[in-house]
Amino acid sequence: MKLQSIELPLGKNQTLQKSPKIVLLVIFTLVFLTVVPYYPLLRRYPSNDSSETPSSSSYDHHHDSKDIGDDIVSTPSGDKYCDIFSGEWIPNPHAPYYKNTTCWAIHEHQNCMKYGRPDSDFMKWRWKPSDCDLPIFNPAIFLELVRGRSLAFVGDSVGRNQMQSLICLLSRVEYPIGVSHSPDERFIRWKYTSYNFTMAAFWTPHLVKSNEADNGVFNVYLDEFDEKWTTQIDEFDFLIISAGHWFFRPMVFYENGKIVGCHYCQKKNVVDLTMQYGYKKAFRTAFKAINGLENYKGITFLRTFSPSHFEGGLWNQGGNCVRTRPFRNNETRLEGQNLELYMAQVEEFKKAEKEGKKKGLRYRLLDTTQTMLLRPDGHPSRYGHWPHENVTLYNDCVHWCLPGPIDIWNDFLLEMFKREGVRSHEEKLQYLRDKKLQVR
Ligand SMILES: *[C@@H]1O[C@H](CO)[C@@H](O)[C@H](O)[C@H]1NC(C)=O
Ligand SMILES: *[C@@H]1O[C@H](CO)[C@@H](O)[C@H](O)[C@H]1NC(C)=O
Ligand SMILES: *[C@@H]1O[C@H](CO)[C@@H](O)[C@H](O)[C@H]1NC(C)=O
Ligand SMILES: *[C@@H]1O[C@H](CO)[C@@H](O)[C@H](O)[C@H]1NC(C)=O
């Protein structure tokens, strides 16, 4: 079994075709007409704190001496301390906000409607946090907040899935142009020229150095940086780091250059450590790399583990995901391997956050696990390819259809950006207070 085919990096023949210029022009015009009236939304929620009041000067984007977040406008919706990640899915007849015909960024294998998915209700839900509202994604606000900045997705194809969702959500305002440094689609870079906003993906399925042995087993070097991303990210303002599904595969773990054990490798004389063991160490090493960067001043988001929903068997043993409705909170819960992976990464995150604070680095939890656990209906299943096509992951219950529930991750991200101004301001005050106490 080939791993590439399960995680499906962009192939040669199925990719992101740019729309002809004329189409873009028409879209631009339409977008202008539709977006401009929303613009006052940018100023709709005045903050109590006068220093945070949105004003036109907040949109200046000098970057230099100020910390990121200082000039991010504070427009959190309602209670800025409400936990946006705890809630329920509720019907939303207005969704979706883009289609496969209006967005060229949808990956072939997540273009579920193209491959004949018969139901469409899975697109018509929104996330309702228990104690506040999560606004629907507003592309104009998002682009204003990230003006002059850069965002990198560090991880596997589920991370890319989120990036493509973001491109589609933003497409009502602008499409990016390709500015990749290499022809390798796994290290793609996009630029939103009117906003001077750069977005990039770094392919690192294990987060640490790894390579494939002949037999489909991966060698994973748990204490070695994957330099393909660790040497490239110090210029970025925001990182969204994530990992998961590759750790379900057979792996041999190395530490100090020596084999310390494996996961499911069935080798004689090699102790079978758990998948969690490798997962935890991989995050530890990835965060260590980030905290050790000299020039990095960005905000690191951990996008937590995204559960798959195979039922009736494993992914390669006839398992499938055929539900057409979300679960309610009381119908399922995080347990077993999902829970263990989630706990392992959050533990490492907390340690890294503490370590990072000493250097003024900020860590944020994009805590999507519970939200997505409730969406067994959001995967491509067998509608990620034509029925006769022989693909390894025939029933894909790992990735997410676009449009679909993964769009919510970007609603979360936008809300977190909005809150960042307030939060970083408060953290800075706390920092100064602590310092004063020390001086006294
Ligand atoms: C979009 O989806 C429709 C079905 O809703 C399908 O017929 C069409 O081929 C798809 N178009 C693209 C460009 O993917
Ligand atoms: C664009 O943003 C980058 C930082 O991401 C900055 O260095 C550069 O000066 C900006 N360019 C313009 C034209 O504002
Ligand atoms: C879950 O909660 C809903 C609404 O509160 C209720 O109608 C339903 O019966 C509950 N389901 C289970 C399995 O407890
Ligand atoms: C599908 O492809 C695999 C290897 O790529 C091959 O072993 C298998 O026989 C193929 N199955 C069919 C039905 O063509």
Image: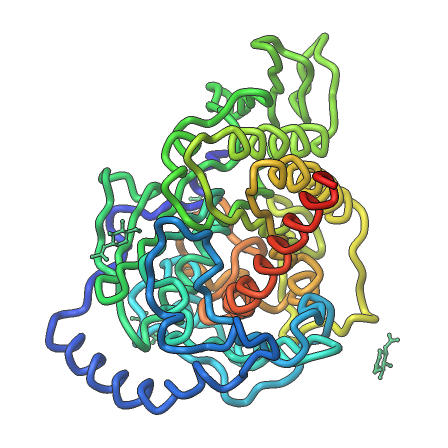
Q: Residue 141 lies in what quarter of the image?
A: bottom left
Q: Residue 387 lies in what quarter of the image?
A: bottom left
Please count the marks in the image. 0
Q: Residue 217 lies in what quarter of the image?
A: top right
Please determine whether, in this image, residue 316 is positioned above or below residue 104: above
Residue beneath the point at 63% across and 51% down: 304
Report the front residue among 251 and 91.
91
Locate the C terminus and report the quarter of the image it occupies: top right
Q: Position of residue 6 (x, y in %)?
A: 48, 43
Q: Position of residue 194 (x, y in %)?
A: 23, 67
Residue beneath the point at 69% across and 61% down: 373
How is the protein colored in the picture?
Answer: rainbow
Report the front residue among 81 and 396.
81
Left or right: residue 232 compared with residue 287: left
Residue beneath the point at 37% across and 58% down: 107
Q: Which residue of the protein is positioned furthest toward the left in this rendering?
A: 22
Please determine whether, in this image, residue 120 is positioned above or below residue 111: below
Please determine whether, in this image, residue 390 is positioned above or below residue 423: above
Q: Position of residue 328 (x, y in %)?
A: 76, 74
Q: Which residue of the protein is positioned furthest toward the front in this rendering?
A: 440
* The image quadrant in which ligand 4 is located: top left
Left or right: residue 64 compared with residue 41: left
Q: Position of residue 430 (x, y in %)?
A: 68, 53
Please determine whether, in this image, residue 435 is positioned above or below residue 107: above
Residue beneath the point at 72% across and 8% down: 269
